[in-house]
Image (cartoon, rainbow, N blue to C red):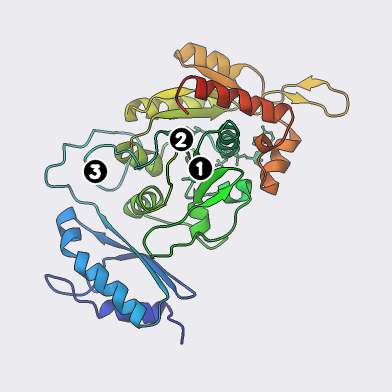
Amino acid sequence: MALDMAGVQKVLAGIACPGGGDLVSRDLVRALSVEGGTVRFVIETATPDEARALAPVQAQAEAALRAAGATSVQIVMTAHGPAPKAPPPPSLKIGGHPTPQTAPGPQPVPGVARILVVGSGKGGVGKSTVASNLAVALARQGRRVGLLDADIYGPSQARMMGVSKRPASPDGKMIEPLRAHGVTVMSMGLMLKEDEAVIWRGPMLMGAMQQLLGQVLWGELDVLIIDLPPGTGDVQLTLGQRTKLDGAIVVSTPQDVALLDARKAIDMFHKLKTPILGLVENMSTYVCPNCGHEAHLFGHGGVAAEAAKLGLPFLGELPLALEVRLAGDAGTPVAATAGPAADAYARIARGLVAQGVA
Ligand SMILES: Nc1ncnc2c1ncn2[C@@H]1O[C@H](COP(=O)(O)OP(=O)(O)OP(=O)(O)O)[C@@H](O)[C@H]1O
């Protein structure tokens, strides 16, 4: 009989931990999922020392689950207490992360030359659209590009890049990302069931981000583009504190209300000491496909003016166009095609390559 949730809990309750109790009675298991023969969960420990002490338990749990019928077992160990000799955490007053800082400073991802994040203050301004199209435009210019959807609460990159296959993990530890339009793609959306709501606490978010960065076989990349969730929350803080980010691109529409929120995102990147590469104006100009009339539904030029005011580079403007939305919905970003929107993305990508940041 296939292993179900109750069966897995029973197996885990039989795994004794050093210091007494078992994995279940010690309440160490998080984010448990059982799907087909695949079992995934996080062992959440309080300190790095406890994580080290529990390493044999992780191996025992894996062996016991396989013996009980699991075909694949993916266990991630996370530790959230202070590391023994870690430097004091930077004092960040934004967001309100629920756990103490544990990492010994921002770390690079092996094999990845640069990490760029695409953020926005406000939702729905086209941040994911810009991230996927920029990734494709850079790949078309010969760069080795990865795209990580860190919008854990509303992942959309799988749809925009046209991938739906669940990533494989032949050894049960490392995850093989997918490839689309010349880009290596990974999204939490590919690891979750469709329509599954994600309600995670801060530590679990950290575990998920660690897994997406550290357990994905990204290979050698010139640039990894990370699509952040909108706003200034846990994911942004976790990433900024733990991962060496080489630059941030802030997307906004020209409206005042979007710009107001973009300022908050910019302020957050300043506090995280992430260099801001510049601002992009999305949904800028609309050209009527019938008569060629130009309209500016959300205004025009507001982002360039804001960039100038803040002393930040303006990277370019992107048209509001039906084909951008249709291409994204259909899984082939408009940057993979030919036309004015693809040209606009190619221009921004060329600028980033010329600056040596992508
Ligand atoms: N320049 C554009 N022209 C036309 N449609 C666009 C453009 N940019 C984005 N869209 C569309 O607007 C919608 C929202 O875009 P997107 O998901 O990229 O925004 P987001 O800022 O990432 O949103 P979220 O806050 O949900 O993460 C999508 O349907 C997308 O196809």
Residue indicated by mark 1: 147
What residue is drawn where x is 38% and y is 65%? 172
Q: Contact (CB < 8 A) between labels 1 and 2?
A: no
* Label 1 Cα neighbours within 10 Å, binned few <14 / some 14-19 / many ≥20: many
- Secondary element at tag 3: loop
Q: Is residue 127 left or right of residue 22?
A: right
The residue tagged 3 is 103
- Depth check, front residue: 202 or 314: 314
Residue occupying the point 73% across, 32% down: 338
Eye-nearest disc, 1 or 3 = 1
Hey, what amino acid is under mark 1? Leu
Indicate which disc, 1 or 2, sits on the residue closer to the N terminus. Answer: 1
User: Distance between the Cα atoms at labels 1 and 3?
Assistant: 24 Å
Front residue of 310 and 156: 156
Determine which quarter of the picture holds residue 316.
Answer: top right
Q: Residue at x 57, y 47 (%)?
A: 157
- Above or below residue 99? Residue 281 is above
- Disc 1 from disc 2: Cα separation: 9 Å
